[in-house]
Amino acid sequence: MEAPPVTMMPVTGGTINMMEYLLQGSVLDQSLESLLHRLRGLCDNMEPETFLDHEMVFLLKGQQASPFVLRARCSMDKTGTPWHLRYLGQPEMGDKNRHALVRNCVDIATSENLTDFLMEMGFRMDHEFVAKGHVFRKGIMKIVVYKIFRILVPGNTDSIEPLSLSYLVELSVVAPAGQDVVSDDMRNFAEQLKPLVHLEKIDPKRLM
């Protein structure tokens, strides 16, 4: 799965605080083709990119109450592509006028020894899974429709089974902090996908 660029513009000095704006939903297996047909008509790429990725979630426990979480992901069907290391901050849910969940986002390409490096740094793998799906694009918006597979034998990505009878749907934009206007465009696009899928601003803490 192609990761979004860390920055959308040249950086001449310092860093840019990038945020991910996110809406999420799900669709049952039997409704997948209808959703893909709708997305082909709405998005810039009529034929979506496909991906098959292996993702591992690593935790580093310290003095703080909650552990530090990093995600390592590699493509299983595109040889020669780099690993990706991703950090996602705590979601900002407070602003009622903002139509999307917002969280800090850092995504970087790395060498293939990423997991060994994380283990040497003291991280421990918490869980792993396989994600398979489709990527559509509409301007700076990215729409991902994918299914998560449970890995039955740790480390063996050939031994998997579907986690559910549905596909996750995510509409996201990665932009510099303060670009809250993008959430209005996201809401308008999400409205066009109803009633096939209802994309919402979901607080992960409510699911725990």
Image: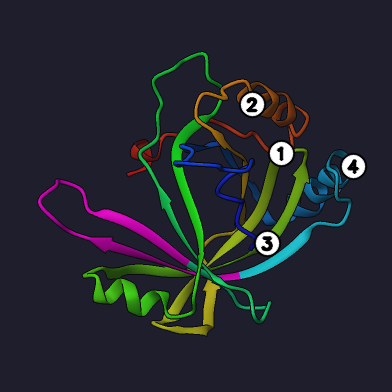
**Extent of the magenta region:** 53-72
Q: Residues within 10 Å of mark 2 (few under 14, many from 20)?
A: some
Quadrant (top left/top right/bottom left/bottom right) for the C terminus: top left
Left or right, 145 with reference to 12? right
Height in image: 89 above or below 78?
Answer: above
75 and 24: which is toward the camera: 75
Q: Amino acid at mark 3?
A: Gly
Give the mark nearest the N terminus, 1 or 4.
4
Where residue 114 is drawn, which disc sits there?
Answer: none
Where residue 140 is drawn, which disc sits there?
Answer: 1
Quadrant (top left/top right/bottom left/bottom right) for the N terminus: bottom right
**Discs 2, 4 touching: Cβ within 8 Å:** no
Height in image: 57 above or below 117?
Answer: above
Q: CA distance from mark 2 to mark 4?
A: 21 Å
Image spot of residue 177 (x, y percent): 50, 29
Image spot of residue 190 (x, y percent): 70, 31
Q: Secondary structure at mark 4?
A: helix
Where residue 182 is drawn, which disc sits there?
Answer: 2
